[in-house]
């Protein structure tokens, strides 16, 4: 039922709309310069074979045109060119320090980035020894920007596990 209603709306007044489109004025070619127009008329009157040559179809050229295969690709934008240039530069990489992470498949980390383990390590070091592990030293050690390190130290903390002693003797002891 929905399709019938859609078809009725689509075909509503179809003939009048088609007639209006057909009778509409078609765009005309751009006007020629007056000196060019007079020169063209003069040449056509002196050489009527030019008009025949213009109107004639050349079968040889048409067959060659049919054999042409055009493969078009969009031009590369300047942003993509810049990205490709930055990707081609070799990155300085470093291995993860002091741990064996074969199960995590961490091969190397680019400079300016840190792994989760390194982030937790530096946060813990800063929490335990804030005089030694300052933002400046962490930035140098891990090749990070100082403002990023300050934000990291300000907004992130490591979890702390606190074991509260049971208040009464009836509490179940862990085995």
Image: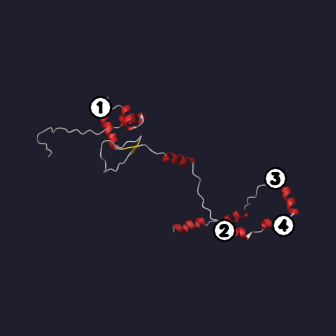
Residue 6 position within the rendered picture, expressed as x and y whole percent measured from the top left? 55, 65
Residue 22 in sight from this viewpoint: yes
Residue position marked by numbered label 2 in the rendering: 66
Residue position marked by numbered label 1 in the rendering: 129
Residue 171 position within the rendered picture, expressed as x and y whole percent measured from the top left? 13, 42
Mark 1 → mark 2, Cα distance in angstroms: 78 Å
Mark in front: 3 vs 4: 4
Residue 96 position within the rendered picture, expressed as x and y whole percent measured from the top left? 34, 43
Circle on res. 49: 4
The earlier-in-sequence mark between 4 and 1 is 4
Mark in front: 2 vs 3: 2
Mark 3 → mark 4, Cα distance in angstroms: 24 Å
Mark 4 → mark 2, Cα distance in angstroms: 27 Å
Residue 42 shown left or right of residue 172 in the figure: right
Mark 2 → mark 3, Cα distance in angstroms: 35 Å
The earlier-in-sequence mark between 1 and 2 is 2
The earlier-in-sequence mark between 3 and 4 is 3
Which residue is depicted at the point 62% across and 62% down?
70
Q: How many neighbours does mark 4 have within 10 angstroms: few (below 14), some (14-19), or many (20 or more)?
A: few
Circle on res. 33: 3
Which residue is depicted at the point 32% across and 37% down?
123
The earlier-in-sequence mark between 2 and 3 is 3
Label 1 element class = loop
Residue 147 position within the rendered picture, expressed as x and y whole percent measured from the top left? 42, 34
The earlier-in-sequence mark between 4 and 2 is 4
Q: Is residue 91 above or below residue 7?
A: above
């Amino acid at each position: 039922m929905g399709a019938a209603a859609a078809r009725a709306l689509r075909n509503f007044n179809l003939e009048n709309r088609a007639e209006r489109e057909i009778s509409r004025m078609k765009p005309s070619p751009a006007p020629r310069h007056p000196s060019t127009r007079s020169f063209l008329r003069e040449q056509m009157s002196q050489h009527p074979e030019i008009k025949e040559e213009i109107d004639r179809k050349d079968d040889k050229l048409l067959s060659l045109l049919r054999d042409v295969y055009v493969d078009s690709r969009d031009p590369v934008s300047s942003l993509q060119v810049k990205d490709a240039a930055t990707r081609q530069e070799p990155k300085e990489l470093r291995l993860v320090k002091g741990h064996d992470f074969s199960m995590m498949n961490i091969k190397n980390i680019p400079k300016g980035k840190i792994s989760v383990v390194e982030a937790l390590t530096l946060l813990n070091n800063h929490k335990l020894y804030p005089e030694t592990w300052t933002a400046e030293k962490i930035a140098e050690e891990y090749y990070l920007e100082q403002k990023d390190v300050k934000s990291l130290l300000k907004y992130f903390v490591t979890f702390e596990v606190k074991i509260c002693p049971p208040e009464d003797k009836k509490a179940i002891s862990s085995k």
